[in-house]
Image (cartoon, rainbow, N blue to C red):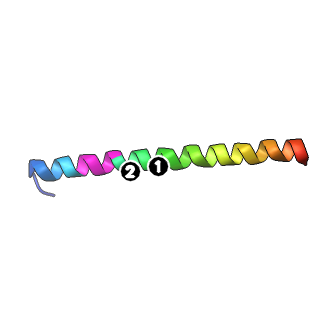
Amino acid sequence: MSDDPEYAEFVGRKRARTKVVAWTVIIAMVLVGGGATVLTLLFG
């Protein structure tokens, strides 16, 4: 790896963006799964 500060900043931003995307996907899956469970209980 390079010791270039600009590269380190890019890697840090990429890691932060990856975390945001991962948490967004996890939350969306929980909400959709939870919504499906509630609908199944109500109409099942």
Give the overall secondary structure of the magenta segment: helix
Left or right of residue 12, residue 7 in this image: left
Residue 43 locus on image (x, y percent): 89, 46
Seen at 84% across and 47% down, the residue is: 40
Instruction: Please give left or right for residue 2 compared with residue 18 in the image.
Output: left
Residue name at image x 87 percent, y 41 percent: 42
Looking at the rendered structure, the secondary structure element under dot 2 is helix
Disc 1 element = helix
Q: Residue at x 78, y 45 (%)?
A: 37
Confirm whether the magenta stretch covers residue 14. yes
Quadrant holding the N terminus:
bottom left
The disc labelled 1 sits on which kind of residue? Ala
- Residue 18, given in percent of the width and then of the height, sits at 38, 50
The span shown in magenta is 11-16
Q: Which residue appears at 81% of the width and 45% of the height?
A: 39
| Residue 18 disc label | 2
What residue would you read off at disc 1? 22
Q: Nearer the viewer, residue 1 or 4?
A: 4
Q: Are marks 1 and 2 in contact (CB under 8 Å)?
A: yes
Q: Nearer the viewer, residue 4 or 17?
A: 17
Outermost residue, left side: 4
Picture quadrant of residue 31: top right
Q: CA distance from mark 1 to mark 2?
A: 6 Å
